[in-house]
């Protein structure tokens, strides 16, 4: 049996366009027979290497003003709630560590989307451990043990390693989608293109196997 | 009779994603009963105000590498030729002035798309007056007189004014699409959204007229 094509979905929990991407990815992927692998990382170090100490949407005012309006329109089109988080960007460190700690758990991908929903749909502060605890409980996770695990040295190291990997892969923003042949697609707008690419790649591979 | 909704298509001739946008805009607009109004301007002064002295695709290496690959994929999907111009960005001043000089002429919009095609489809230098002259001749324009008009003071001033207007409208990149109610859509990816918006707006206005 052919294995399903995999797309790595790289995101930072503070990234605005990763919100609609997260809300769309699972449904689009499963209806296309594609597996989405969640890869949380931190944009901060990558932005810092580009000389930015905050989100470019804060640095470049017109671009930021546009982004909020565009995001609002996108959310309306998708019928998902939108409420601008204040302050922006939020510190996504804790959420990212919890997401890494929960890798392989049944609730994990649901947790990721719930964090985005809380932040951009309800304007809740995802850097607040109480909020993260509530989200964990909502998705049926043992909150206390995973909050503890999230603060352990192996998980801290894993997030640093994952962020370095993102940089090595040429990732410069989020969301980014990476297919198994290393093809990079940047932005919520490119989710469909990434899925098409992954499917075509799987078909080519299956064809190659038949031919050989 | 209802008048067709208008979308202002703001672009810089050196802008990479304005190439597919220009190749798509006219067809999509006319099949949707929308009029596209070409508004060439210069990104240079707008980038300068953001602290950039060249294209951000040159300043941010990973983003630049990605953009060229993304553009290549887009052009393949659209079955339009792609050949990276060297150097990048090209100086778009002359092409923009000619496009302004030709406003209202039958060949004008065709000239704009031909400039993009020459630059990003054939890697020709659009800052070379010989290339612009050839393009003018190809689209059936009286080349010599419009090259002359392009260098006149009123046209130079008009380009400065148009560029200032872009800044006032909150335009920070190209292509940008602006509907009659001032709604801004940035990027080739947003052309369809701009067209939908313009059509909905026209329907609302028509409905309002019927109601009143």
Image (cartoon, coloured by chain):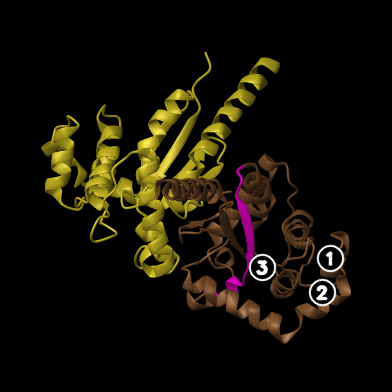
Chain colours: A brown, B yellow
Question: SS for tag 1?
Answer: helix
Question: SS for tag 3?
Answer: loop
Q: CA distance from mark 1 to mark 3?
A: 21 Å
Please determine if labels 2 and 1 lie on a single subunit: yes
Q: Chain of mark 1?
A: A
| Residue farthest bottom in this picture | A153
Question: SS for tag 2?
Answer: helix
> Compared with residue B118, is residue A67 higher up or lower down, i.e. above or below?
below
Q: Is residue B154 visible?
A: no
The residue tagged 2 is: A146
Which one is in front, A66 or A140? A140
Mark with earlier residue (1, 3): 3
> Compared with residue A115, is residue B198 higher up or lower down, i.e. above or below?
above
> Compared with residue A47, is residue A73 higher up or lower down, i.e. above or below?
above
Q: Position of residue B5 (x, y in %)?
A: 50, 27
Residue appearing at x 35%, y 59% in the figure: B44
Label at residue A136: 1
Determine if the magenta segment contains residue B138: no
Label at residue A188: none
Query: Callout 2: 10 Å neighbours few (<14), some, many (20+)?
Result: some
Query: Callout 1: 10 Å neighbours few (<14), some, many (20+)?
Result: many
Q: Chain of mark 2?
A: A
Tell me the mark number nearer the camera, choosing from 2 and 3. Answer: 2
Q: Are marks 2 and 3 in contact (CB under 8 Å)?
A: no
* Range shown magenta: A32-46
A144 to the left or right of B127 = right
Q: Quadrant of residue B203?
A: top right
Which one is in front, B156 or A123? A123
Label at residue A89: 3
């Amino acid at each position: 049996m052919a294995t399903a094509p995999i797309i790595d979905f790289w995101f930072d929990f503070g990234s605005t366009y990763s919100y609609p991407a997260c809300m769309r990815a699972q449904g689009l992927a499963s209806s296309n027979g594609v597996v989405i692998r969640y890869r949380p990382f931190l944009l901060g170090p990558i932005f810092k290497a580009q000389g930015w100490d905050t989100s470019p949407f804060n640095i470049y005012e017109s671009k930021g003003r546009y982004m909020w309006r565009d995001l609002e329109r996108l959310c309306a089109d998708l019928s998902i709630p939108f409420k601008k988080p204040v302050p922006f960007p939020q510190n996504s460190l804790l959420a990212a560590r919890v997401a890494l700690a929960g890798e392989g758990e049944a609730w994990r991908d649901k947790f990721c989307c719930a964090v985005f929903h809380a932040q951009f749909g309800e304007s809740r502060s995802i850097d607040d451990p109480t909020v993260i605890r509530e989200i964990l409980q909502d998705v049926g996770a043992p909150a206390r043990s995973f909050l503890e695990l999230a603060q352990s040295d192996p998980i801290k190291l894993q997030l640093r390693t994952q962020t370095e990997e993102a940089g090595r892969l040429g990732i410069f923003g989020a969301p980014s989608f990476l297919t198994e042949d290393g093809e990079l697609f940047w932005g919520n707008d490119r989710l469909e293109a990434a899925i098409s690419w992954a499917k075509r790649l799987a078909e080519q591979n299956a064809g190659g196997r038949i031919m050989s």
